[in-house]
Amino acid sequence: MTQEQIKNKIEKASKVIGKTWPLYSFVTSNPLSGYENLSFDEAISQARKYLSATVYPSASVFDDALKQGEIHNEILIDLLKKQNFTESPEFYLQQMTVEEQENNGLTVKPNHDLDRIISKWLATFMDEGLADWTMPFKEEGFYRSWRELAIYDSELPKLKLKDIPESADAALELILKDIDSKDIDTLFTYHLAALPGWTGYINYRTQSESIWQEKYPISLQEYLAVRLFVAHVIHAELLPENIEDLSESSQLQIPGIFLEAWEKSWQNSLVKTLSRSAEVEPDDHEKVPDAQMVFCIDTRSELIRRHIETKGHYETHGYAGFFGIAMDYEHLDDGVTYKSCPPIVTSAYKVKEQGKPEQVGALENYKLKVKQNDFKYYFLKRMKSMLPSAFGFVEASGFFYGFSLLMRTLASRVSNPLEKHENTGFEPICSPEMSACSGHDEVSVNEKASIVKSAFDLMGWNHFARLVLFIGHGSQTANNPFGSSLDCGACAASPGRHNARLLAKLANMPEVRNVLNKEYHYDIPEDTVFIGGEHNTTTDAILLFDEDVPASHHEALKILKTDLEKAQQTATTERLGASKNSVAMAETKANNWGETRPEWGLAKNAGFIIGPRSLTKYNNLDGRCFLHSYQWNKDKEGKALEGIMQGPMVVTQWINNHYYFSSVDNEVFGGGSKITHNITGKFGVVQGNGGDLKLGLPLQSLKQTDTSFYHKPLRLSVVIQAPLKRVTDILSRNESLKNLLDNKWIYLMVMDPEEENEMYKYDTNLNWLSANATSERIKTKKEVETSTSPEVYV
């Protein structure tokens, strides 16, 4: 077998693993994204086969959903009968329970010793600065550095350097010569799936081309070469005999029917809610609101938007939290550049802070403080780590650390990390400056105007208040390795403040406003001021970066801030169920170093609604829906909708599937319990003292008690208000989107405003059903294409 053939087989086998994102930019993504070209059922069959994973909610979870009325009994019975299952739901629940108990031992026999040895080497090689003593020869790559040191590994048989093949290619050739060619795909897939956390992180490093990967390269081919050679010399089982039986070992059809019934029950409730809202006349847009606020589509925005709208004549909108700016952001504190746009988007701009000329001294003082703090951290770390000083350091500093820990435990509130820039003077003395990632420093006025125009177009704006706020979001949490998972997913797990500030700055530029008004025919009043802000999703506080707002707007801004504080009060009261002191309670949770769940993140997400605010404004959606503003009658060519479907809809599917799989099998796809987490290499966590990297969300982000789930593991249901023909046209020219629907990774429903908001549900191959029908096909692809109903633009 040629090296090219081996590489192709490795690439094919690697689809069983996703990407394990580092803690500092923990992005929620579909762990089975490599199988999205297969149906959901086929993909989970592969996951069960190679990962020994549970792929559906347990019988007890379904039972609880039935008792709570979340699964409608008549829907479940109807779906069971259609598949010729005629017994009662209780009968099949009992059957599932028995199967779960029987299948507890029906997994691939694990190679514990092999996994432990390989995990040890991976943790050592892939360390990103946590260890004080670096593994030698790392610059030569994983295989060569391992080869140099493997002769000293006491867990391996006595080896000499000449006993180990000189290259990864040679090692694979040695192992594969005794393997039947028809078994090689299965062999590679099995061993890549054995440590999906580690191999997923190798995937991340190679695909992101990180600086660590550039300096210390590692590949899946090198991983397999080391693993298979070690398996060979310790006589581990290369390929379990029962692996082909696993996907057929249990009846997966019945839990699949229960899941579909749960999802359809949720969809029916959502359809009723939105249909009632569509019958209500939308708000009178002739009266310009006192302020317009644009929030991320994040499910946590739904709560705060509802409460803000009740505090005054305010208008809120939803837009992906990177605000349409495909950028990387260079942090002022450490000079490190992070991605601040969706992972599926290539960054076009680099943004960094530029000090204002009149306040250069303040900026220099800030940078000096940062350097001093960095040195203190480095000094303390070295004192704790160096052998000569470690014991004395512990003896001398123990009292002070203990006192500090006590104060943090007793304190009800410490400084809010999201306010640190306001306290240090960073925000008033700096403004974001953008340059092109291509290396050119200048970004043209037309390009800047185009960024702002795209935001207005996607939301369907045609009027502007005196105050327009772009509000990103970030989370506040203490002692939480998974803290970045609570930040903005659209910003690659970074806070959205930087994108919000930059969009506000661009929209305030006179030259940009001139292009928007004259060339794109937006009528932006001269007294409209754009302001960046950030929503703290743990405390529901909203911080505004308003240092440049003119004096003429100060009184209006003061009233707005007062109303935002009132909204924080009522929002935290609803979210935390506290009758009084809810803000203090939220702040305590945010700053408590022992708090296992400072906030719930995107738990309970189940829907994505693309349409005007009037569809959702007067409904409490319980934080279960992503909300993207869209005005179908202002998107004449459908380009805005196509952009929303290509971008935010795909990202929300990633988020939803990440939560789904972390819930149904937290051991394989999730993060396990925070209680026994240990950080490794600065980029990941392991359970206890070693093993595989945890690749998903911890239990505490999904369950409210040891036995009951907070998150409901349902696939995403998308609702779009737009002409059915327009949506069908978009799907017909976007095969990847059509595949997500045909393969049942997500559901799609369309509310057609040209047919009195009749609701249609996507079936397969561009055919549609009535959202309320059970089997009758209402519109075929051909019927939609030949529809003569005119498109009316208002």
Image (tube, rainbow, N blue to C red):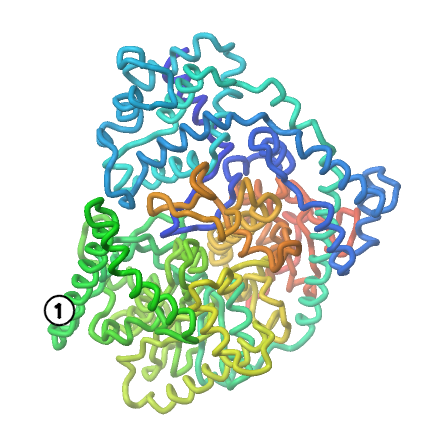
Seen in the image, is 119 located left or right of residue 351?
Answer: right
| Image spot of residue 6 (x, y percent) | 41, 18
Image quadrant in which you'd find residue 755: bottom right
Q: Amino acid at mark 1?
A: Glu
Q: Residues within 10 Å of mark 1 (few under 14, many from 20)?
A: few
Q: Secondary structure at mark 1?
A: helix
Above or below: residue 33 compared with residue 465: above
Name the one closer to the observer, 674 or 572. Answer: 674
Above or below: residue 546 compared with residue 433: below
Name the one closer to the observer, 496 or 514. Answer: 496
Quadrant where the N terminus sits is: top left
Image quadrant in which you'd find residue 608: bottom right
Seen in the image, is 787 located left or right of residue 222?
Answer: right
Residue on which disc 1 sits: 364
> Which residue appears at 31% of the width and 63% of the height?
401
Above or below: residue 637 compared with residue 524: above
Residue most extreme to the top: 178
- The answer to whether residue 436 shows anywhere in this view is no
Image quadrant in which you'd find residue 744: top right
